[in-house]
Image (cartoon, coloured by chain):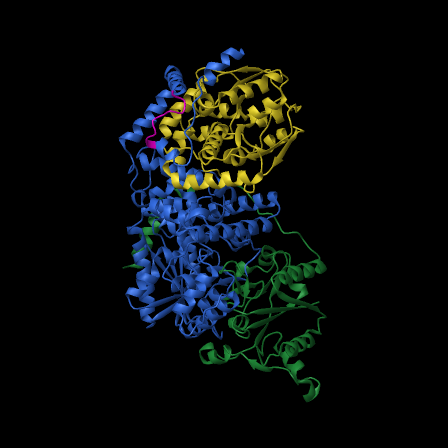
Amino acid sequence: MEAEKTFDFENNIEKALRDDRLRKNLRNAMDILVEKRRSVFPDREHLERLRAAGNAIKRRALKQLPCLLEQLEANCTKNGIQVHWAEDTAEANGIVLDILRRHDAKEVVKGKSMVSEEMHLNHFLQTHGIDALETDLGEFIIQLNHETPSHIIVPAIHKNRDEVAAIFQEKIPDTPYTENVEELTAIARRVLRERFARAKVGLSGVNFAIAETGTLLLVENEGNGRMCTTVPEVHVAVMGLEKVLEKLSDVPPLLRLLTGSATGQLITTYVNMITSPRRQGEKDGPREVHLILLDNGRSHILSDPEFRQTLLCIRCGTCLNHCPVYVRIGGHAYGHVYPGPIGKILTPQMEGLRRAGVLATASSLCGACAEVCPVQIPIPALIRRLRRESYDTGDGATVADAGYRSNLAETLIWKGWELANTVPALNRLGTRLAGAVGDKMPNRGPLKAWTRVRTAPKFAAKSLHDRVGKEGVKNE
Amino acid sequence: MEKQEYPAKPETVYFFGTCLMDAIYPDAGLAAIRLLRREGLSVLFPQGQSCCGQPAYNAGFAGEARAVARKQLEEFPKPYPIVVPSGSCAGMMKHHYPELFAGTPEEDAARAFSDRVYELFEFLVRVLDVRLEDRGEPVTITWHSSCHALREMGVVPYAKTLIGQLKNVSLVALERETECCGFGGTFAVKQPALSAAMVADKVADISRTGASKVVAGDCGCLMNITGAMAHSGVRIAGQHLAEFLWERTHGS
Amino acid sequence: MNSQASRERILARLRSSGTEQTTVPVAPAPEAPSLDREDKIARMTELMGAIRTEVHVVAADDWPNKLKELAREKGWKRLLYGPDSPIGPDVEAAWTAGGEDHGDGLPKLIPYTEPVERFKENLFGMDAGITSCRGGVADTGAVVLWPTPEEPRLLSLVPPVHVAVLDADTIHDSLAEMMAVENWAGGMPTNALLISGPSKTADIEFTLVFGVHGPKEMVVLIRK
């Protein structure tokens, strides 16, 4: 949580916007991801049907969430997977630590997991003398450089090859400087293979958990996820409890949506479905598999019929790729684990408005995110709702710190605006006054923000209201 | 977006002028009214109308937005279509009024009102089936889509249909036509740095087209873009499409 | 810390969330087109080929010869396999067929028959691994593996080349169809896998590199 203590969104934004290299890297990367997605979903009508199906499947899962979790637990247990429940990240971290200690493990190899980021697990383990090694190439790079992911799917996307080369040279012993991406990848392969071979415990996230069969499904391209879940003696999977699906037949449409939206792939290199630890006679695979179900505010989010839709998310990251704000500032500026549009709605609900409500201001409500969301989360509507709760404790507010932003000045402005737009005489007076002033308004407050990069709006001498009469346009 | 159904050509329509057009771009409003009247329609402009309520709604002040929206419900009582020269305001009135009034006594009225809302260019093409005759000199323009016209209303194709009817107008597309210009109502002043970065990129994109004019269907975007162009010394004109269409097609 | 107490509290909150009121729209997923055998083979070849999988369509009984050809061509020294797997006996027969001369240039066959704990060093020193497949999925292009005691999971992951032998008759139109037809819900294996190509990454500037953690090459032999 270090980063969050000093979270200064405005400053982060200004800093990111000044970083030309970051902006160029992001723009190039997002253009590629957007184009890849477009090419993998060429048929609009087909995609819309798929998105509707994805939305329905996830809604059906959330509708029966407590039952499905119990069913998942029962089936996993029957299959030999040990299930743990964690109310918050501290508890989840404690469970992981317990397992590691029982196996006397001093290190753990990790596949990519946003939930483990949410838990700040690596930092936690480090304080207990355990080395958590990220093995996804992008995660490996940024971990070497003591950074956090800047994107849900492509965590090191803010880095150029020369930056990676410098990091490898500096942090990996006996490594020459090379900007050749094949060579850089080979270096990572060499380093990480040694660690896979010796680690006692592997940790992963979960893309979907299937209640019907007690199966954990993971997608990936690199093979590090399979390494982490197959080579070590113990596999620990962490998942947000909203990731459960009812049936195996729910998987194919969501899988298509996930890989297509995330990276523009019809399918990832690997789809890894884990249903049990090593069974009798099997030669490999972990002897113990643990599943940690994390709540961390999700049950509270579920209780609001509108905000509940946040939990439909399958973490594909496509809302980031299509967001005009994300593409200009990147993930770190958001100051929290989940960046971009999904982060703007998820983080304030998890952490409260006082700590993260400001994220909801960073949207023009352009709707690009909702247009592409594979499960049809109405992100702009939820951003609007968060803005409302930032000022207003009424109307069934459910997010922590509702009303934290309430202040007399803004209240008066909007009350004044209301009057000016409900009392015709005031409205006319307003436009006439403005018309008399033209573009010579005093340059203060909101206008000052506006005129940083724009000329002031010029009010017309006569408003449309005044001019329609001359045209012979009737009132009614 | 559900499939929109369109009525037969009516005799009378309401015109909702939008607050920005009223105060800043009245010429565009008059042009829109003239385009409608030229098709033989009687156009009504209720003098009690004001703003669709979107600024407050998007800023988080739903109560104030509802009060202003209620005023519009009252001002357009007859069953005529309501033509709105803005994809954004039309989107507010068509798609957000029902949720804004959900669970209130006005819920049904809001729904009935929403059903009557059409964006101007959508109405000109789908209901009036207008055919424009270009009388202007050859010109190269570019087009900016407002996000709500594009995504909430889905009406951008109609604007382009109309531009396509003008034989002396050549339209050069922006490289990032579907990207937001950074206006976003209060976003522009609550996140001024982000908004500035967005509009700067939009202006650069417009400049690269070589067009002498950028045409848009929403006054908010227009105010943002032309303000930024003027501030940075980019000498490209900005104009609402209604005004552009009228200028090029009316016989003087 | 008490996981049981946490469990009860979490479930209680979920049960009181009112989520059972959620409306679920009726929205069936679009189905994959139904292809005939030839088209399925063609689609598998095309899609997997596009992500750098080497696909060879071979006569049903000729695949061991193709394997030998590839093994020589690629210069493998050690080929990992499961002797008791469905393809194990065929591999062994092919390796011993035709007398000593024919064995020239062929890799040594290494059986994966011991638990990984005693086999790790060997495992990480292979040039290639060969597995059978449970089936194929045509609409996205992927082979399906259900590793068994006879054909362990790491066979398809650790060696730098993975050869998968796929029966054309087991290619399904889609994963959805395969799951339904084979009633996967009735019993899942320890680890079911879909594999569409060699291991890859694009984490550095979107430059595509193969063989980051898993196999650098993948070969699919489709038995026609």
Seen as rendered, the residue at the extreme bottom is C100
Residue C183 falls in image quadrant: bottom right
Residue A438 inside the magenta-drawn segment: yes
Q: Is residue B65 above or below residue C67?
A: above
- Circle count: 0
Magenta region, mostly helix, strand or loop? loop
Which chain is depicted yellow?
Answer: B
Q: Quadrant of the N terminus of chain B?
A: top right
Whether residue A110 is visible here, answered yes or no, is no
In the image, the segment drawn in magenta is A437-445
Q: Colour of chain C?
A: green
Which one is nearer the viewer's eye here, A310 or B16? B16
Residue A310 inside the magenta-drawn segment: no
Q: Position of residue A267 (x, y in %)?
A: 56, 57
Whether residue B5 is visible here, answered yes or no, is yes
Q: What residue appears at the point 50 percent right and 38 percent down from the top-left corner? A: B203
Q: What residue appears at the point 58 percent right and 27 percent down from the top-left corner? A: B121
Q: Position of residue C173 (x, y in %)?
A: 64, 56
Q: Is residue A56 above or below residue A273?
A: above
Q: Position of residue C116 (x, y in %)?
A: 47, 77
Q: Colour of chain A?
A: blue
Q: Position of residue B72 (x, y in %)?
A: 44, 21
Q: Quadrant of the C terminus of chain B?
A: top right
Relative side of C35 to A13, left or right: right
Residue A353 falls in image quadrant: top left
